[in-house]
Every structure is written in structure tokens, then in C-alpha cells.
Amino acid sequence: MSAEQTAVIVLAAGAGTRMNSAKPKVMHELAGVPLLGHALATASKIGAEHVICVVRHQKELLVEYIEANFPHVIIAEQDELAGTGRAVECGLSALPVGYAGKVVVTSGDVPMLDVETLGELITSHTELANAATVLTTYLDDPSGYGRIIRDDFNLVAIVEHRDATEEQLDIEEVNAGVYVFNAELLAAELAKVGTGNSQHEKYLTDVVAQLIQHGHRVEALVVYDYWMVAGVNDRAQLSQVAAELNRR
């Protein structure tokens, strides 16, 4: 794995309303450690030069935890513009001016993602000289996830669940929300992304579509062990991930 000139942006700005809790979603614990702690520990172990955590909702609690447990992590704050694309843009602004390496994007609510899986993603991205590499998985029930649209084998686009057609909703390969990008291309394409979708948000997935449209090499790497990329959005999913972690 080549982690030289690599930055990791961990997204942790969301409110996590489906938890129905006053506590921020990423601060709910799994095996005695907040979800965010699992994500930042993995991000910190791949040898990246920079690890950035993007916060917004109840940011004081997150900042206090990060400063106490991960003092090397740079904190970036998302502004009032919504969406994963905007969150990443805010994370990029915390990098040194002119940074031209790789940018890994992951999430504070994906606690079982491990160093090996992230390493394989970075290695694949580097060896193939991709503009972007996307982690995907297969789900029997893909409800709520962005669908991976392929033309034969090649990745064509990622369509968010709310914006998908009936035919696209039948696709079982989904976006795991973990990516590697070329930093300069990522910044340039994010600047062009609008909010013309059902959520009026700036989607990071639009960057993938734009890179493909402009002829850049973008690959989708499948993780067949779903638990590596299982996100936690509510208490039921938290208990499922906890049970699987205990089983392992």
C-alpha cells in the first residue's frame, strides 16, 4: 500500500436523526468506543500524511473527543451548505495549499472498515492510476443506498436512491461511501457540482459522474464482506453491527 501523499477525510457532520437520540450518531458506542473512534483509528493507521474530520452537528462534543483521543487529527467544519460533496470540499480546505496527492474519503458511521480493506482500495487506485476509485458492495436489500450503474463492466454513474428510476432500484450493487480521489481533480470537479437533486444537496457522487463524463479513469472495487462497509444509521443497525463484531 502506498500511503505517501495521502490524506484521509472522515465525514462526521450529519445529525443522524434516525438514532432518535440527543447524542450525535457518531458518538454512540460500539464495543466501548464511539463509532467515530473506530473510523478515526482506521484512518490513522494507514500512514496518511493528513487525517481530517469534518464536523458540524453538535460539533463541540465531537471536537472535545477528537482533541482528547486523536490530537493529530485536523478538524474542519462544514458550513450551512448541505451534502457529502460540500463536506468533502470543507475537508479539502484544511489541507495545505497546493496539495496534490490522493484523498481518501470515508465516514464516521462505518465502524468495521479495516486497514486492509482501505489499503486494497488505495493500492488499486494507485496501480491503475485512477482519477477516482469507489468501494462498492452487494446487498439483498439495497434500500436507501446509492446504486452502482455499469455499462457491461465499466462504472457509468452512482445514482442516489431518491433519484433512481424503478429499474435502477432493482440493482443490488451499492455505493459503500468510501472513495479515493486525485486531489486536484476532486477539487476542480467539486467546484462544478450543483444542488439540482431531490435533496437540494451537493452530492459527492456527482464528482464521480463528472470524472467519467470527462474521460477520466474511474473504477469500482467490490468488497464482498458487507460488514466491512456497513453503515450505522439507527439503533437497529448499531445492534446488528455490535452482534457481528462480537461474533468475529
Image (cartoon, rainbow, N blue to C red):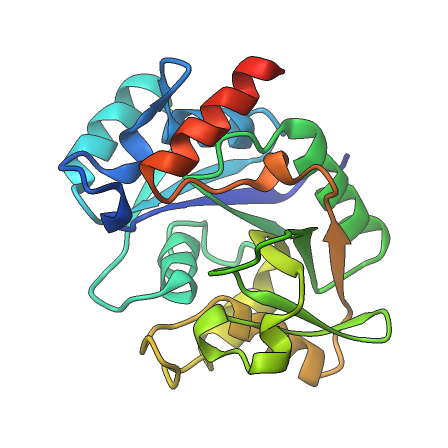
Residue 85 position within the rendered picture, expressed as x and y whole percent measured from the top left: 43, 65
Corner quadrant of residue 205: bottom right
Instruction: Determine whether 171 is above or below 43 in the image.
Output: below
| Residue 3 seen | no
Tell whether 19 sits left or right of 194.
left
Nearer to the camera, 202 or 184: 202
Count of all numbered marks drawn on residues in the image: 0
Residue 189 position within the rendered picture, expressed as x and y whole percent measured from the top left: 53, 75
Instruction: Determine whether 59 is above or below 192 in the image.
Output: above
Tell whether 164 sits left or right of 10.
right
Nearer to the camera, 27 or 99: 27
Residue 150 position within the rendered picture, expressed as x and y whole percent measured from the top left: 76, 73
Residue at image position (29%, 66%) is 82
Residue at image position (46%, 56%) is 97
Residue 163 position within the rendered picture, expressed as x and y whole percent measured from the top left: 47, 79
| Residue 201 seen | yes
User: Where is the C terminus found, in terms of image quarters?
Assistant: top right
User: Where is the N terminus found, in terms of image quarters?
Assistant: top right
Corner quadrant of residue 209: bottom right
Instruction: Determine whether 178 is above or below 84 in the image.
Output: above
